[in-house]
Image (cartoon, helix red, strand yellow):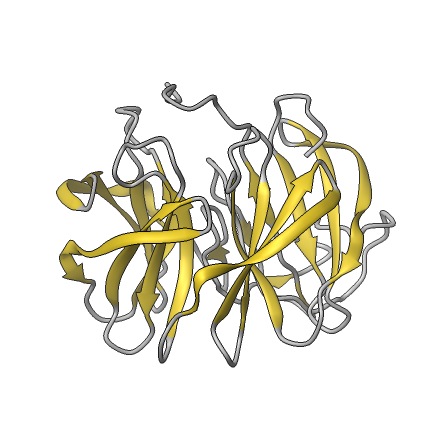
Amino acid sequence: MNGDGKPDIVLQEASTKQLYVWYMNGVNRTGGAYLNPKTVSNNWRVAAAADFNADGKTDILLQEHSTRQLYVWYMNGVNRTGGTYLNPKTVSNSWKVVGAADMNADGKADIVLQEASTKQLYVWYMNGVNRTGGAFLNPKTVSGNWKVVAVQDMNADGKPDLVLQEFTTKQMYVWYMNGINRTGGAFLNPKTIGGAWRAVGGNGAWVTVAASASSAMMDTPNGTDDARTAEASASGSKQAGCNAGTGLIAALLLLPLLPAGLRRK
């Protein structure tokens, strides 16, 4: 978010909808700033982050909770330079965006969605903000209480994989993917996280996580411990978790972008 080539963290406050970025050097916060504008209206939530206008800068994809409308903020660092609805601008029923990544190797960010009740997985192939096609993933469903919490290359083959979490056992599992096709899988090591911890890493996985100031060591934008509420969304290469406490916090991890045609090793 500040052009230094290092992933930063964007936080959203659930009641005020304020957006704030932590500038990071690895796991260390070096500074921060509110986004401009610093709020989104009504029930809009950050759902994913990707370059949707091919300018080499990370943009922010938002989804409206009740209408399922999708809108992209074009960004230059923390400053919004414009925006537009996606085409089409809505997803049906209880489909939610769980990530944005290039799923068909055309150098353009696509959108991965999961249906809340059936657990079906579907990808919108995109050309910027315009949907050009789509397909169910193969397999197209996950079982039980498994939910996608990240869309990220987990085996360094240059292809986006899916990270899933089982929300009862807290187990973590990765689907290795070749486009929309699962080629294998493995539990993470360790495969579980304890207590009320939830994964919030990845491209926009909507989960609710609780942050305890004493155990999670997560601060508010002004640097002081505070109990605040937020929906959790994340985009990036690392998983993160927050322990149960009095507040909820949201984090969006933004990856440095690579020029079209190049892949992260």
Residue found 85% across the figure and 47% down from its top: 223
Above or below 57: residue 219: below
Q: Nearer the viewer, residue 191 or 150?
A: 150
Residue 132 visible (yes or no)? yes
In the picture, the quarter occupied by the N terminus is top right
Residue 216 visible (yes or no)? no
In the picture, the quarter occupied by the C terminus is top left
Q: Position of residue 56 (x, y in %)?
A: 56, 28
Residue found 24% across the figure and 55% down from its top: 134
Q: Nearer the viewer, residue 61 or 10?
A: 61
Q: Nearer the viewer, residue 252 or 80?
A: 80
Above or below 95: residue 222: above
State how many labels appear: 0
Q: Quadrant of residue 250?
A: bottom right
Q: Nearer the viewer, residue 170 or 205?
A: 205
Residue found 63% across the figure and 53% down from its top: 83
Q: Quadrant of residue 143?
A: bottom left
Left or right of residue 14, residue 144 in this image: left
Q: Position of residue 17 (x, y in %)?
A: 73, 66
Q: Position of residue 36 (x, y in %)?
A: 80, 49
Residue found 73% across the figure and 74% down from its top: 15
Left or right of residue 61, residue 215 in this image: right
Q: Quadrant of residue 230?
A: bottom right
Q: Position of residue 146 (x, y in %)?
A: 28, 64
